Image: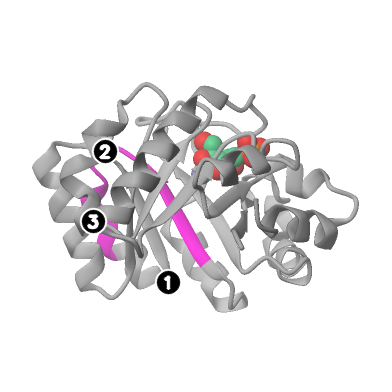
Amino acid sequence: MAIVAPSILSADFANLERDMGVIRDAGAPWAHVDIMDGQFVPNITIGIPVVKALRRVSDLTLDVHLMVDRPGRYAEAFCKAGADYLTVHLEADTPEKIRQTLLTIRSLGVKAGISIKPGTPVEALEPYLAVCDMILIMTVEPGFGGQKFMEDMMEKLRYLRGRLGQCNPACLLEVDGGVDSRTAPICKAAGANVLVSGSAFFKAEEKAEFVARLSAEA
Ligand code: DX5
Ligand code: ZN
């Protein structure tokens, strides 16, 4: 079974508590929270106070995706705000700083994730495979919802599925960008077990059915 993580980037920001309830009522166990700083990506979304507020009104697993330059500056604050998973981008700082940030996140009792953009080769993740709890493969350029799924990223998932089997079998493998009921089976067949879905989830008429279909075995 895959974990479905609807992305609140496509929710109504004036009704976040209501939409966290929509996610829960659809049977999705996680909510994906996109943090963008206008530097690492050309868009700005929400920050620490909003994560804190979401934590107050929801028991869903908060999967916080930092698209932020030098994320180590904010890791502790997001952990304390209530993130359950905190994912940083490999491209957002030096390898040493990123490694240190993953260790900091874990030391605060939060699951540490690392992500790569479509242009970053998967081999660049090798030094981090043993020190993270989740790897997030972007299947669009980070920054905006509603973009086209990049199927050529599936090669990265297949590679990681093999490598994690050898060195970190508990590590989750997440995909983000353009995931819907057509592309989800492709992701699962390539080894993904966490599926982020923003626009497709919020557009779906029958959300419980949508979540059940995405979470079903490949
Ligand atoms: C994009 C974000 C995604 C976004 C996905 O930068 O990281 O989480 O919400 O949206 P969809 O599912 O619409 O591609
Ligand atoms: Zn995301």
> Residue beneath label 2, please?
90
Q: Amino acid at mark 1?
A: Gly
Task: From the image, state whether disc 1 or disc 3 is nearer to you.
Answer: 3
Instruction: Judge the density around disc 3: few (<14), some (14-19), many (≥20) Cα neighbours within 10 Å.
Output: few
Q: Nearer the viewer, residue 10 or 39?
A: 10
> Residue beneath label 1, please?
82
Instruction: Judge the density around disc 1: few (<14), some (14-19), many (≥20) Cα neighbours within 10 Å.
Output: many
Q: Amino acid at mark 2?
A: Leu
Residue 74 visible in the current orientation: no
Residue 191 visible in the current orientation: yes
Residue 163 in the image: state x and y as whole percent: 29, 46
Label 3 lies in ligand 2 vicinity (Cβ under 8 Å): no
Q: Amino acid at mark 3?
A: Cys
> Residue beneath label 3, please?
167
Task: From the image, state whether disc 3 or disc 2 is nearer to you.
Answer: 3
* Dot 3: element: helix
Q: Residue at x 75, y 42 (%)?
A: 181
Give the Cα distance between marks 2 and 1.
22 Å
Image quarter of residue 59: bottom right
Give the Cα distance between marks 1 and 3.
29 Å
Q: Residue at x 75, y 66 (%)?
A: 18
Q: Residue at x 42, y 29 (%)?
A: 41
* Dot 2: element: helix
**Earlier residue among tags 3 and 2:** 2
**Earlier residue among tags 2 and 1:** 1
- For this orientation, the residue located farthest to the left is 96
Q: Which colour scheme appears in the figure?
A: one colour
Residue 53 in the image: state x and y as whole percent: 54, 69
Q: Magenta stretch: give its range.
A: 62-76
Q: Residue at x 84, y 59 (%)?
A: 209
**Earlier residue among tags 1 and 3:** 1
